[in-house]
Structure formats: C-alpha cells, structure tokens
Image (spheres, helix red, strand yellow):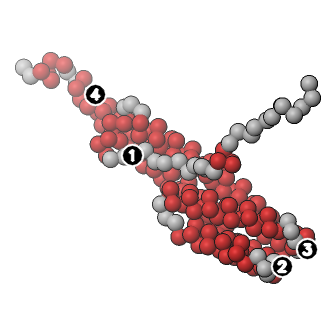
C-alpha cells in the first residue's frame, strides 16, 4: 500500500487546487501588467499632446514678445528634452523642467496684455489647461494600477510566484517639485491679538 492510497483522492484535490491557484495568480499578473502598460500609454498620449502644443504656444508668444528670446528658447529646449526622455525617472525630471519653463512663459505673458487678449493664445492656453487636467487623471490612473501591481508582487502568497517569475515592484509617477508638495506656511505673528 502506498502513502497516496492511504490518503485517498485528497492529494489529487490539493494538487488540482494548487494548479488552479498558480493559474489564477499568473493571470492576475498578466491582467495587472497590462493595466500598468495601458496607464503608462495614457500618460504618453497626454505628454505628446502637450509637447505638440508647445511650439504653437511659443510661436504666438514670439509674435508679441520678440525681445524675450532666452525664455522662448528655454521652453523649446525643455520641450525637446521632455520629448526625448524614455526612462520614467528621466521623464519625470524633464517634464518638471518643461513645467517650470511653461511657468516662466506664462509669467512673461503677464507683461503683454495684448497677448493675453489674443484669441489664438487664449485657445492654446485653454488647450494646455485641458491637457494638464487629462495628464493629472492619467498619472492618477497610472499610480493606481502600479499600486495594484505592487500589491500583487509584495503580498503573500502571490509574492512566491512573483519571485520565481522575476516580477518586480514598479515605480510611481511622482511629483518632486517642492513648490507643489510643500505645505503652505501660515504666519499668525503679524495678526492683531
């Protein structure tokens, strides 16, 4: 009499359940991996829209602010660097640079009231605001899918399959601009008692 014969059919049931669990977990990795790639693609689409809008914005501003060449060249250089970045940390850094350059561009616009009133500039500015909103949603979706992926990679027992299959934790798309993440300071010392 063998040991398996003494246990009856239970080893087969447990083996079948193990195979089903492995298949379910593997499919979860596939599903979450596809979501992460889809979310990353959504960010790419919005960044491309922003990169395509910048030259038009610079052209309109250039028509009004001819002696502000340095600022305009800085925006174009930041746009080109952002468009060429591939790895996530490089993209985050280059996109922060582009955002800073666009901030300088819009500060420049404040000195030209006729530019602010230009219908082409207003339309481009509206498009940029729309793109920034869509980009914020795309980043939020990406970070949510990365969170789900990372949970799958790190949780027990799926982390066992993750370690055997070489699945790794993915980085979040994070904002590291101190001005955007800093808590506003409120000073009550100037107020009257």
Q: CA distance from mark 3 to mark 4?
A: 78 Å
Q: Dots 3 and 4: beta carbons under 8 Å?
A: no
Question: Which label number is shown at residue 114?
Answer: 3
Inter-mark Cα distance, 3 to 1 = 53 Å
Q: Nearer the viewer, residue 171 or 191?
A: 191
Residue 61 bears which disc, if any?
A: none
Q: Relative to residue 108, is residue 102 drawn left or right?
A: left
Give the residue pinned by disc 1: 168
Residue 5 image offset from top left, x and y in percent? 14, 22
Position in image of residue 96 (x %, y %): 62, 58
Q: Residues within 10 Å of mark 1 (few under 14, many from 20)?
A: some
| Mark 4 surroundings: few (<14), some (14-19) or many (≥20) residues within 10 A | few
Residue nearest the observer in this picture, 49 or 76: 76
Sequence-first disc among 1 and 4:
4
Where is residue 75? Give x, y as percent. Answer: 67, 71
Q: Earlier in the sequence, mark 3 or mark 2?
A: 2
Q: Which mark is residue 13?
A: 4
Question: On the image, numbered disc 2 is attached to which residue?
Answer: 64
Which mark sits nearer the N-terminus, 3 or 1?
A: 3
- Residue in the image at 85% along x and 65% along y: 110
Q: Do tag 1 and tag 4 residues touch (Cβ < 8 Å)?
A: no
Of the numbered discs 3 and 4, the one sitting upstream in the chain is 4
At 80% across and 68% down in the image, what residue appears?
Answer: 108
Residue at the image point whose x is 28% and y is 27% from the top? 14
Q: Residues within 10 Å of mark 3 (few under 14, many from 20)?
A: few
- Whole-Å distance between the Cαs marked 1 and 4? 31 Å
- Judged from the image, the secondary structure of the residue bearing numbered disc 1 is loop
Instruction: Check contact, mark 3 vs mark 2: CB within 8 A.
Output: yes
Nearer-N-terminus badge (2/4)? 4
Please state which of the two labelled residues, at mark 3 or mark 1, is closer to the viewer: 3
Of labels 1 and 2, the one closer to you:
2
């Amino acid at each position: 009499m063998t040991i398996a014969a003494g246990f009856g059919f239970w080893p087969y049931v447990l083996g079948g359940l193990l195979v089903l669990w492995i298949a379910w977990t593997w499919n979860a990795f596939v599903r979450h991996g596809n979501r992460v790639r889809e979310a990353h693609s959504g960010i790419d689409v919005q960044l491309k829209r922003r990169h395509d809008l910048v030259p038009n914005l610079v052209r309109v501003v250039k028509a009004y602010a001819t002696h502000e060449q340095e600022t305009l060249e800085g925006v174009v250089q930041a746009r080109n660097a952002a468009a060429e970045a591939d790895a996530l940390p490089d993209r985050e850094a280059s996109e922060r640079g582009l955002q800073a350059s666009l901030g300088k561009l819009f500060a420049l616009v404040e000195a030209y009231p006729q530019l602010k009133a230009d219908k082409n500039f207003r339309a481009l500015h509206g498009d940029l605001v729309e793109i920034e909103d869509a980009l914020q949603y795309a980043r939020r979706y990406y970070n949510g899918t990365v969170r789900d992926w990372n949970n799958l990679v790190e949780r027990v027992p799926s982390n066992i399959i993750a370690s055997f299959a070489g699945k790794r934790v993915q980085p979040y798309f994070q904002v590291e601009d101190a001005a955007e993440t800093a808590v506003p300071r409120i000073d009550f010392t100037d107020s009257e008692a």
